[in-house]
């Protein structure tokens, strides 16, 4: 990847402050670039919903679709999976070994990638575990490769579906497109709060004040913590539900904002929150941001 791309520049600016993230960010920036290139090869019919069904969902505050209804260009997703395996094989860790095993299973047809994509979309943990055993890798690694491979297709669908949401407010904590929970919030240059879906990456605005996890507006129950050395980051927590979510204040950023890079560059905040006894809002959801291991 060219070193002067905005994504590469953002990565390098983060690494100047936190060099411990070198391996993680180098890996993910390669992944995100591969996803962008793959996006140009995707061939799918536009996803649509009957207008009467849309109005019914709006009336009942329901997401537009269930995750299993997302369309996947399996040819493009399989091509991307092979590329991601190649990238991961250079990591020299457990992820590298998983990539070798997954690529071998694809080559000798021990698994059908299309069935793996379907299993993840349907949150079929039993089927995913079966595939993992067949391949000889952990379910976590299989989910990671599978999700990253089909993410461009999912995000294209989400962007198309977001057209149905124009002029519709949605101040809920779940994604109005697919119903999944957010893995990040960010404050824009005007201080408005937005959430990013952990599955389809759709972003939507919510009120600045109030807890994302419960109906209480008591500030004593919803503290947040941050470091003066990292003014761009904060972690909002709920002492009632013991949940947390990471956030980025774009007004304090000295680089282009890429939500997925910021997620990968803040694992230390996840550790701090979990050590304090909080769990992520998206914990327990099969599809969530992949981690290097």
Image (cartoon, rainbow, N blue to C red):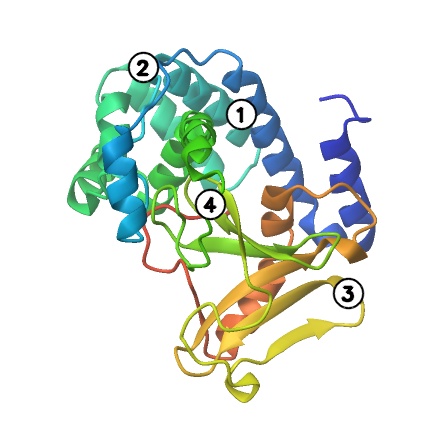
Q: Is residue 62 visible?
A: no
Query: Does the residue at mark 2 contact the one at mark 4 (Cβ under 8 Å)?
Result: no
Which mark's residue is nearer the viewer, 2 or 1? 1
| In the image: residue 76, left or right of residue 206 | left
The mark closer to the camera, 2 or 3, is: 3
Disc with the residue nearer the chain's start (2 vs 3): 2
Mark carried by residue 290: 4
Label 1 – label 4 distance at C-alpha = 14 Å
Binning the other alpha carbons within 10 Å of mark 3 as few (below 14), some (14 to 19) or many (20 upward) gives some
> Residue 181, relative to residue 270: is it above or below?
above
Q: Nearer the viewer, residue 53 or 22?
A: 53
Q: Earlier in the sequence, mark 3 or mark 4?
A: 3
Number of labels in the image equals: 4
Q: Residue at x 51, y 19 (%)?
A: 39
Q: Of tags 1 and 3, which is closer to the observer?
A: 3
Determine the CA span between mark 2 and mark 3: 47 Å
Mark 3 highlights which residue?
231
Residue named by callout 2 = 107
- C-alpha span from label 2 to label 1: 21 Å
Query: For the residues marked 2 and 4, what is the alpha-carbon distance in whole angstroms?
Result: 24 Å
Percent across and percent down for residue 14 are 76, 48
- 23 displayed left or right of 4: left
Viewer-nearest of labels 2 and 4? 4
Residue 115 at x, y percent in the picture: 21, 26
Splitting the image into 4 quarters, where does residue 123 fall? top left
Q: In the image as oriented, which residue stretches furthest toward the bottom? A: 220
Badge 2 or badge 1: first in the primary sequence: 1
Mark toward the viewer: 1 or 4: 1
Report which residue position mark 1 lands on: 35
Pointers 1 and 4 in contact (CB under 8 A)?
no
| Quadrant holding the N terminus | top right
State the image quarter where residue 145 is shown.
top left
């Amino acid at each position: 990847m060219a070193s002067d791309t905005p994504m590469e520049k953002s990565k390098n600016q983060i690494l100047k402050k936190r060099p411990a993230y070198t391996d993680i960010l180098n890996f993910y920036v390669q992944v995100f670039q591969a996803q962008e290139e793959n996006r140009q090869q995707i061939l799918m019919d536009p996803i649509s919903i009957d207008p009467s069904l849309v109005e019914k969902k709006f009336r009942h505050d329901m997401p537009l679709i269930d995750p299993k209804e997302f369309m996947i260009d399996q040819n493009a997703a399989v091509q991307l999976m092979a590329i991601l395996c190649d990238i991961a094989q250079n990591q020299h860790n457990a992820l590298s070994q998983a990539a070798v095993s997954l690529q071998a299973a694809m080559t000798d047809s021990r698994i059908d990638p299309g069935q793996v994509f379907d299993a993840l979309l349907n949150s079929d943990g039993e089927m995913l575990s079966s595939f993992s055993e067949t391949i000889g890798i952990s379910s976590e690694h299989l989910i990671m490769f599978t999700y990253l491979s089909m993410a461009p297709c999912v995000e294209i669908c989400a962007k198309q579906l977001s057209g149905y949401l124009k002029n519709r407010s949605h101040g809920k904590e779940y994604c109005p497109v697919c119903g999944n929970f957010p893995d990040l919030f960010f404050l824009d240059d005007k201080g408005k709060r937005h959430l990013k879906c952990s599955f389809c990456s759709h972003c939507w605005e919510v009120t600045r004040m109030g807890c994302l996890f419960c109906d209480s507006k008591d500030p004593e129950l919803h503290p947040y913590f941050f470091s003066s050395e990292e003014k761009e980051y904060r972690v909002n927590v709920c002492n009632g539900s013991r949940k947390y979510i990471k956030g980025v204040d774009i007004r304090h950023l000295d680089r282009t904002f890429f939500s997925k890079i910021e997620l990968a560059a803040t694992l230390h905040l996840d550790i701090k929150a979990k050590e304090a006894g909080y769990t992520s809002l998206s914990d327990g959801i099969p599809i969530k941001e992949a981690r290097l291991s």
